[in-house]
Amino acid sequence: MFENLSEKLDKAFKLLKGQGSISEINVAQTMKEIRKALLSADVDFKTAKSFTARVKEKAMGQKVLAAINPGQLLTKIMQEELAELMGSEHSEINLKGSPAVILIAGLQGSGKTTFAGKLALLLKSKKNKRPLLVACDVYRPAAIDQIVVLAEQVGVAIFQDRKSKNPVEIAKNAIKHAKANGHNVVIVDTAGRLAVDEKMMAEITAIKSATNPHEILFVVDSMTGQDAVNTAKAFNDKLNYDGVVLTKLDGDTRGGAALTIRSVVDKPIKFIGTSEKMDGLDVFHPDRMASRILGMGDVISLVERAQQQFDEDEARKVQKKIAKNKFGFDDFLKQIQQVKKMGNMKDLVGMIPGMGKAMKDVDIDDDAFKGIEAIIYSMTKEERKNPKLLNGSRKKRIAMGSGSTVVEVNQLIKQFSQMGKMMKMMQGGGGKQMMQMMQGKGGMPKM
């Protein structure tokens, strides 16, 4: 996410490294590189120019504290200004209606229908809502089939009328259906076009008038850069929507749309699509995104994702097993499954401060755990429960069954054993022992 922009900004900050103070000359050079980085990310010239002017003004107006260097000070100013550029604080979705009606608009191919399914899942699982998906795209072939499949996939109700070609009537009937069947959120998926046209705008405006939505969300493909910003403005002029959804941020996006939309249309970015999976939808936090762009990580979002997947009851069971030396490979598998549910592996690593830069050239497969899982699944139930049973012949059989080598099986068993010891030390307060173990002291291999 924004790897190219992050890399170019990092190079710009290097101009100040080793400098004893901020001066007109070194700040001007740095601002020039930052402006180039923003322009290459498809941020429009006017926004890039005003942004760097604000950063320069703040930098020149501050004295460098003894504890930090000019590069660190500029990074802090950049983080604050980037967050301000993208909206400063995150904006909540309005769900106060009975039912709350959410109207989704956007061009064809922007990911509207997929977002509708993702939003339904998010509201169901995190907000305890009973959403109703509404199929109002009566033009695109298989559009209704797509949203029906998505509704089944996320386990929510769907309202469709294949006989009708009137999206306004379909939307109105869907709201009546929602009231009669206890649905407290109605998500209306509308038709898109390949470009903005009067017919499309007239139709979406008519649906808005008929349904009186509590929230209108404009969905935009972040990979289209400045075109996305221009389209966002055209839609806003007609609809006056409440917020923007940026999809495909996990793709080869340059970041221009995310950095520019707020300043052009003065509407907050409310959600971002982070993967193709149905749970790949995040609430947008400008300050956290600014930190990630600058390579500072996003620990808060990482912790929130972990909290969503790990429940307290399961944690207590694991603690008891560790205390009794009964933590086996089946328990390890459960932990792996929970980590995988947290999202794209490279995205997760990028949330750890400093790791985004370190891993930028490393290709982290989403199936990074596949080899480990294959080895564990090749074990018998007793072997998973009691790893001490794993002798030479058993390891050879497991290697053959998992398509790995005995060396790889041994490595996994060794790492599993070390992990168990670390977890037990953490429970027992053995911080010093654990640090020695991680540093390779006391006869333990370096981790």
Image (spheres, rainbow, N blue to C red):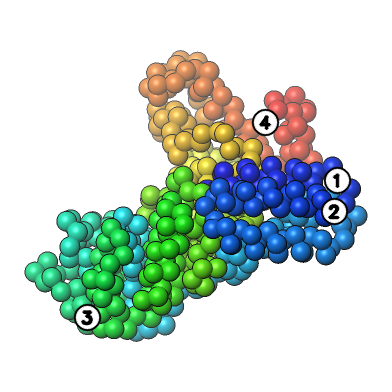
* Mark nearer the N terminus (3 vs 2): 2
Q: Residue 230 carries which label?
A: none
The residue pinned by badge 4 equals: 447
Relative to 159, residue 246 above or below: above
Local crowd size for mark 4, using a 10 Å CA cut-off: few (<14), some (14–19), many (≥20):
few
Relative to 413, residue 110 above or below: below
* Residue kind at label 4, given as amino acid type: Met
Q: Residue shown at 63%/44% (left/top)? A: 8
Relative to 280, residue 128 above or below: below
* Residue kind at label 2, given as amino acid type: Ser
* Mark nearer the N terminus (4 vs 3): 3
Element carrying mark 1: loop
The residue pinned by badge 3 equals: 172
Front position in the image: 180 or 56: 56
The residue pinned by badge 2 equals: 23
Local crowd size for mark 1, using a 10 Å CA cut-off: few (<14), some (14–19), many (≥20):
few
* Residue kind at label 3, given as amino acid type: Lys
Local crowd size for mark 3, using a 10 Å CA cut-off: few (<14), some (14–19), many (≥20):
some
How far is disc 4 from disc 2 in space, using C-alphas? 44 Å
Q: Is residue 356 left or right of residue 224?
A: right
Q: Of circles 1 and 4, which is in front?
A: 1
Residue 76 location (% of width, % of height)? 74, 58
How far is disc 1 from disc 4 in space, using C-alphas? 36 Å
* Mark nearer the N terminus (4 vs 2): 2
Say whether marks 2 and 1 touch (CB < 8 Å): yes
Element carrying mark 2: loop
Residue 220 location (% of width, % of height)? 40, 60
* Mark nearer the N terminus (1 vs 3): 1
How far is disc 1 from disc 3 in space, using C-alphas? 64 Å
